[in-house]
Image: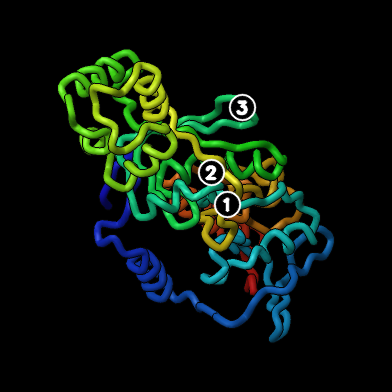
Amino acid sequence: TVTERGGRVFPASESAADVVNALVTWNRRVGVEIRTQMPVEQLKITDNALTGVRTPQGIIPARAAILTTGGASYPGTGSSGDGYRLAREIGHTVVSTRPALVPLVTAGDAAQKCQGLSLRNVRVTLWIDGKKGESEFGEMLFTHFGVSGPIILTLSRGAVDALQAKKRVQISIDLKPALDESRLDARLLRDLDSGGKKQFHTLLKGLLPQKLIPVCIEQVGIPADKVCHQITAPERKRLLAWLKDFRLTVSGHRGYRQAIVTAGGVALNEIDPRTMASRRVAGLYLAGEVLDLDADTGGYNLQAAFSTGYLAGRSAAAWIAEQYPFNDPG
């Protein structure tokens, strides 16, 4: 594995397919039968114990099963959210689901004008109904619809929750987080003094990426061709404020189609954390994103899936061996 900025962990090959191939290869080596095109329609329960699973091809008898259907994110990969329905039908509580680690849609055209621009070492703060919320430092990206990138994805859960509650959501981008306002103001004074007859848009080239300059000029309200020594103190203060607090209004998000994970899911208090066993149905185990369990970007959701899946698998096998020591569990 490799660790990138912000503690994000990825395969050294940078290929998700390698992770899938490793898992499939190992399963085949130990004799696991993989059946595709066979969706589970229903879990069969008798006297609060699992007895089988219903598929379009018929019922598969089973004394133990592991519900690891994932969430509702990226439906193109096969995630349909069916696991929530299956769990709910047998009595489990499903905490309200919503997209998480999802790109955000912004109002206006400021983000669109910066499309493709990646900013590093910036601080983004979430503002909800005028109140300061979570803050993240790192990398973000402007897109044709709004904003994305690691720190935006991390902040998106709070943004999505607030949007669902019909609250006003904004993000504030501190473009110069290494400098407090007094130090940044001192730098601006020096730059303006030394700039002389240099035009404002030229001065900005030393402060901002090219794509941000037109946005800055428009929002700060200083003419692009105004010479540095003519820029007034109030204008300098407006520039200072914008550099420390570039605001974008969040109008929506990209939904499950582009969300990396799904927040919400089967309530954790209905799962035994020592075994991942259902506290509602004997012989049923749950793992991964179908649970009310999600984390920041950086491999943590994958690790949660791996760890809960490993524990559920070992626990289900141990339960079968204990309950039916002399019988064929099938």
Q: Quarter of the image holding residue 8? A: top left
- Tell me: residue 135, above or below residue 104: above
- Tell me: residue 79, above or below residue 142: below
On the image, numbered disc 3 is attached to which residue? 130
Q: Is residue 78 visible?
A: yes
**Spatial CA span between label 3 and label 2:** 17 Å
Q: Residue at x 44, y 29 (%)?
A: 245
- Tell me: residue 208, above or below residue 149: above
Between tags 3 and 2, which lies in front? 3
Q: Residue at x 37, y 27 (%)?
A: 239
Disc 3 or 1, which lies upstream in sequence?
3
Identify which residue, 42 or 162, lies in the foreground: 162
Q: Residue at x 71, y 83 (%)?
A: 56
The amino acid sitting under disc 2 is Ser
- Mark 3: few/some/many CA within 10 Å (<14, 14-19, 20+): few
The amino acid sitting under disc 3 is Gly
Give the secondary structure at mark 1.
Answer: strand
Percent from the top left, x then y, of residue 278? 69, 51
Percent from the top left, x then y, of residue 52? 72, 71
Q: Is residue 23 left or right of residue 104?
A: left
Between tags 3 and 1, which lies in front? 3
**Residue 156 has which mark?**
2
The amino acid sitting under disc 1 is His
Disc 1 or 2, which lies upstream in sequence?
2
Disc 3 or 2, which lies upstream in sequence?
3
Q: Residue at x 55, y 25 (%)?
A: 132
**Spatial CA span between label 3 and label 1:** 19 Å
Percent from the top left, x then y, of residue 143? 43, 54
Q: Report if the CB atoms under discs 1 and 2 are less than 8 Å apart.
A: yes
Q: Is residue 212 left or right of residue 51?
A: left
